[in-house]
């Protein structure tokens, strides 16, 4: 009998193709690289693919959740930009996968300013892909942890004007913050930095939609040390305290202003919503 992280089958990992070589452990899975694998990306390693496949075996509809979350992000950014938001703070952006927040926002209004935040070395290695956008706008990337809200806000203020409305985006990242680390306080501090008219957009892996989701979480947990906290609809609603939810409220991500009835009916295990700061 063996203990510890399971060995992954498949090809040996390669360095990132862009020539940057940050120091990280390719024998341990990372959530950003697993997510990249689920989205069909190439910036993942054998252990990430093994974790991803184990999760899919436990919950085959997981792939729909991942893709639906990406589509939700696209619709949210478009909605916010069309509503007049010109500043976005996208935390937990993950490995660049087109379209990115700045590409969507700057298609609506080229002068949009976007700051990305992540703490994965692979995302840092590919950050230059996040720094190209419309010449009228600005994009920036911060290497920081979501828990360090002070550092995020201080550094983001070099690009964003927090006297003007800002959209804080937390897409499928809050499950990495356990309740013992005050996720509600983290979100409150972030949205509290902006004035009235700012927005909070988030998605959260649900604990009360499909029982198989917990099994998928346990499978991923065999390959990575980070524990995941999935939340109920009521627990997710707490993130929006004091804010005004935009219709249709907090719903499955596929049901938030879907592009089609077929898209809305896709199975997913994430809650998602957008709220405005009064």
Image (tube, rainbow, N blue to C red):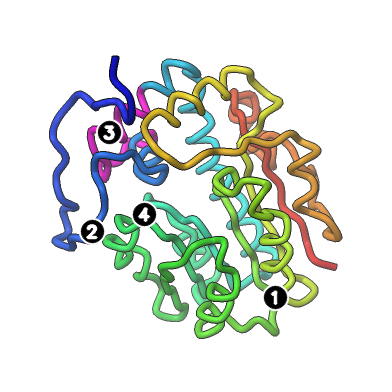
- 180 falls in the magenta region: no
Q: Earlier in the sequence, mark 1 or mark 2?
A: 2
Magenta region: which residues? 38-53
SS type, badge 1: loop
Viewer-closest of 53 and 275: 53
Disc 1 to disc 3, C-alpha distance: 38 Å
Number of other residues with Cα within 10 Å of mark 3, as a class: few under 14, some 14 to 19, many 20 or more: many
Question: Residue 96, labelled with which disc?
Answer: 4
Q: Quadrant of residue 237?
A: top right
Distance Cα–Cα, label 3 vs label 2: 16 Å
Left or right: residue 48 compared with residue 190: left
Q: Position of residue 207 (x, y in %)?
A: 67, 29
The disc, 2 or 4, on the residue closer to the chain's N-terminal end is 2
User: Which label is found at residue 275?
Assistant: none
In the picture of the structure, the residue carrying the numbered disc 2 is 23
The residue pinned by badge 3 equals 47
The residue tagged with tag 2: helix, strand or loop? loop
Q: Are the residues at dot 1 and dot 2 in contact (C-beta closer than 8 Å)?
A: no
Give x and y (percent) for residue 244.
84, 57
Residue at x 46%, y 67% (from the top left corner): 144
Q: Nearer the viewer, mark 1 or mark 4?
A: 1
Q: Helix, strand, or loop for circle 4?
A: loop
Q: Earlier in the sequence, mark 1 or mark 3?
A: 3
Nearest to N terminus: mark 4 or mark 3: 3
Q: Residues within 10 Å of mark 4 (few under 14, many from 20)?
A: some
Tell me if label 4 and label 3 are in contact, CB under 8 Å. no
Residue that appears at 27% across and 41% down: 44
Residue that carries the numbered disc 1 in the rendered image: 193
Labels 3 and 2 touching (C-beta < 8 A): no
Q: CA distance from mark 1 to mark 4?
A: 26 Å
Mark-to-mark CA distance, 4 and 3? 20 Å
Quadrant in the rendering for residue 255? top right
């Amino acid at each position: 009998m063996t203990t510890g992280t399971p060995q992954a089958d498949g090809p040996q990992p390669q360095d990132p193709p862009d020539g940057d070589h940050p120091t990280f452990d390719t024998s341990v899975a990372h959530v950003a690289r697993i997510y990249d694998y689920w989205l069909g990306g190439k910036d993942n390693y054998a252990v990430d693919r093994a974790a991803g496949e184990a999760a899919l075996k436990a919950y085959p509809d997981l792939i729909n959740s991942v893709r639906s979350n990406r589509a939700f992000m696209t619709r949210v950014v478009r909605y916010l930009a069309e509503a007049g938001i010109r500043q976005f703070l996208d935390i937990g952006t993950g490995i660049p996968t087109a379209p990115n927040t700045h590409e969507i926002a700057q298609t609506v209004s080229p002068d949009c300013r976007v700051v990305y935040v992540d703490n994965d070395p692979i995302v840092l290695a590919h950050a230059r892909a996040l720094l190209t956008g419309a010449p009228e706008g600005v994009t920036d990337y911060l290497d920081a942890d979501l828990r360090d809200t002070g550092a995020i806000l201080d550094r983001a203020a070099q690009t964003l004007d927090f006297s003007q409305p800002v959209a804080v985006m937390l897409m499928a990242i809050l499950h990495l913050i356990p309740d013992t680390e005050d996720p509600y306080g983290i979100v409150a501090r972030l949205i509290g930095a902006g004035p009235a008219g700012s927005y909070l957009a988030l998605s959260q892996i649900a604990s009360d939609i499909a029982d198989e989701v917990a099994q998928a979480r346990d499978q991923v947990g065999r390959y990575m040390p980070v524990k995941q906290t999935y939340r109920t609809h009521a627990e997710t609603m707490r993130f929006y305290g004091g804010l005004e939810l935009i219709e249709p409220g907090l719903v499955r991500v596929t049901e938030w202003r879907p592009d089609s009835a077929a898209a809305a009916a896709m199975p997913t295990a994430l809650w998602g919503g957008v709220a405005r700061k009064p």
